[in-house]
Amino acid sequence: MAKVKIMETAFRDAHQSLIATRMSTKDMIPIAEKLDRVGYHALEVWGGATFDSCLRFLNEDPWDRLRQLRKAFKNTKLQMLLRGQNLLGYKHYPDDVVEEFVKKAIENGIDIVRVFDALNDLRNLETSIKATKKYGGHAQGAISYTVSPVHNNEYYVQVAKELAEMGVDSICIKDMSGILLPYPAYELTKSIKAAVDLPLEIHSHFTSGVANQTYMKAIEAGADIVDTAISPLGNGTSQPATEPMIVSLQGTEYAPDIDLDLLLEISDYFRELRDKYLAQGLLDVKMLNVDVNTLKYQVPGGMLSNLVSQLKAQGKEHMYDEVLKEIPRVREDFGYPPLVTPMSQMVGTTAVFNVILGERYKMVPTESKNYVKGLYGKPAAPISEEIRKKIIGDEEVFEGRPADLLEPQLENYRNEIKEYLEQDEDVLSYALFPQVAIPFFKQRLAEKYRIETDLLNQEEKTHPV
Ligand code: CO
């Protein structure tokens, strides 16, 4: 038995889950020095939706955030979340873009790259895992957790073994919806630890109210690391709170080496931040409640609120219950994909179409068609002939690795933004989010020009010519 390690998510998943990823770098830096002394295994600070949010809402360069954080954290490992071949976007990128992205993430300060694929199709992780190893990072293979007739312990053990063969340094069970229950977590952890000789990390969300118990049982079964969020940003749709988790383990062989007094000082800082977010209307107290729908439908909280707004936009709110019932049926037809980005959106929208149009698969969103064509990878269970015919007719299903269909793009991207290029990393910002990167570059240029003009004017004032 060994001491458990704690991975803190305050700077990534916690604010992504609670305040739509709006924490700015200037809210992070003042507390970094203290966080760096706590004794965390790592801090998740980058990736997921933070990249998009920096450019789109905060007028920040995500690469600059990473460099600032790297400078502030001298002792603690920095971790990021990467959607495999999707990187931080919503489609597959060619291998040259994926490799360059991972290289730059590590160069700018990331130590641990957690990669996952919504379908657990490991071919979608090959390039990012290889690149992480090549550039000296720690590659963590994350398994998307879901519940279905085909997602049993044998399935997860098989995925873990294959990840180990691919050379990952650790494994994570990634439960994005908070549906991993305590006793199944115990069995799952035991099975994976028995099959694979790698550190195992558990990532869950408090959404349905069970994650604390789940972590405790997983720890008893041998989990090495658990993901938590400092209490003012913990629980609700975020991770279980850090401090209660640590106190719960005190006096046992699992007790982590964490400076609890320091942690309590840090909580004060984040409590003030949380109050600020509440006052700004960024934090909705509803996010802090236990969501019983997640327990009932095993649908992530974010997906439910998306559904409500989709239905509202059509004036069809009264069909909400019907759509909720249609989701598991679509999911079954689709081979039980875990409901994580982009599958949650795909399954949700398809269910909405099916219900609103009064006939199943009469009209199907393009993404769902592409999914059935195999362009996102292979589902855990096969899609039936009948459903496939309904959705894509006689079109062929692609069986290979989806990224093999993509030509290298990096040079094209570089040429397209030549006029704005200030650092190599800009190419990647543009590759991922062209619509938000360009306005960001333009503003950056204008800002620079304004500062130069100001300086020039000052110069003229002090040294009249
Ligand atoms: Co998460």
Image: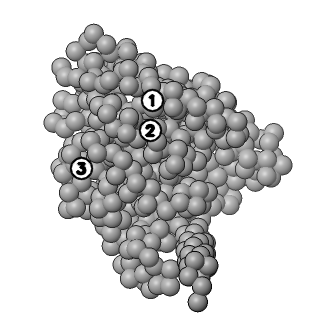
Q: Amino acid at mark 2?
A: Ile
Mark 2 near mark 1, Cβ–Cβ under 8 Å? Answer: yes
Residue 188 locus on image (x, y percent): 31, 28
Q: Residue at x 68, y 45 (%)?
A: 307
Which structural element holds mark 1?
helix
On the rendered image, what quadrant is the N terminus found in? top left
**Disc 3, ligand 1: is the CB inside 8 Å?**
no
Question: Front-most of 249 and 455?
Answer: 455
- Residue 348 location (% of width, % of height): 62, 48
The crowding category of the residue bearing disc 2, from other C-alpha atoms within 10 Å (few below 14, some 14 to 19, many at least 20), is some
- Circles 3, 2 touching at the beta carbon (< 8 Å): no
Q: Residue furthest right?
A: 315
Q: Earlier in the sequence, mark 3 or mark 2?
A: 2
Looking at the rendered image, the quarter that the C terminus falls into is bottom right
| Residue designated by label 2 | 31
Q: Earlier in the sequence, mark 2 or mark 1?
A: 2
Q: Is residue 110 left or right of residue 130?
A: right
Q: Quadrant of residue 252?
A: top left
Q: Quadrant of residue 40?
A: top left
Disc 3 and disc 1: Cα gap in Å? Answer: 27 Å
Q: Where in the figure is residue 130, as x and y percent of width and height?
A: 23, 60
Location of residue 302 with respect to 60 vertically, above or below? above
For label 3, the residue is 138
Q: Nearer the viewer, residue 38 or 223?
A: 38
Residue occupying image coordinates x 45% and y 79% = 421
Q: Dot 3 surroundings within 10 Å: few (below 14), some, or many (20 or more)? A: many
Residue under numbered circle 1: 266
Residue in the picture at 75% in, 54% down? 357
At x 64% / y 60%, what residue is drawn?
364
Question: Is label 3 or label 2 in front?
Answer: 2
Going by the picture, which residue comes out furthest to the left? 197
